[in-house]
Image (spheres, grey):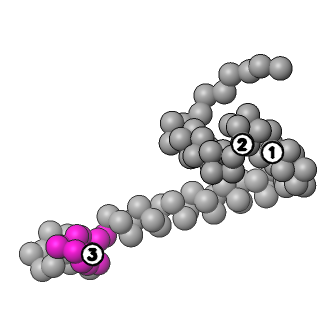
Amino acid sequence: MKTTVDLPESLLRQAKHKASQNNTSLRALIISGLKKELASPMKVVSDPIEQIRNAGKELWRGIKRIITFANCARIGNKVHFLGQESLRGSSKV
């Protein structure tokens, strides 16, 4: 059966390269990957509260990464953490 799948360009390049390395076709690689994914047990979270907790944890991790990145300054090849006084506009770095 034929179908069309929209893949990110970089993922498609990687898949073609992997298929070439394994001396197989892209079709065979995709079939193999789908079979492996479908054979593994699916993780189902039936509790909506647990789903919200998990989403909140992921959101908080993302926020912490953004804050950490925003509090850093790249000077040459080094990254420096900016203290609170630097964040308020002080000239200390």
Q: Which residues are magenta?
A: 71-82
Location of the N terminus by quadrant is top right
Closest to the observer: 59 or 8? 8
Residue drawn at the location 63% of the way across and 63% of the way down: 57
Q: Quadrant of residue 88?
A: bottom left
Residue drawn at the location 66% of the way across and 27% of the way down: 5
Q: Which residue is mark 2?
A: 24
**Residue type beneath disc 3:** Val
Magenta residue check for 20: no
Q: CA distance from mark 1 to mark 3?
A: 43 Å
**Category of crowding for the residue at label 1, using alpha-carbon neighbours closer than 10 angstroms: few (below 14), some (14–19), many (at least 20):** few
Residue 71 point in image, percent of width and height? 31, 70
Image-based side of 25 in relation to 12, left or right? right
The local secondary structure at tag 3 comes to strand
Q: CA distance from mark 1 to mark 2?
A: 11 Å
Count of marks, rendered view: 3
Q: Which residue is mark 3?
A: 79
Q: Which residue is mark 1?
A: 32
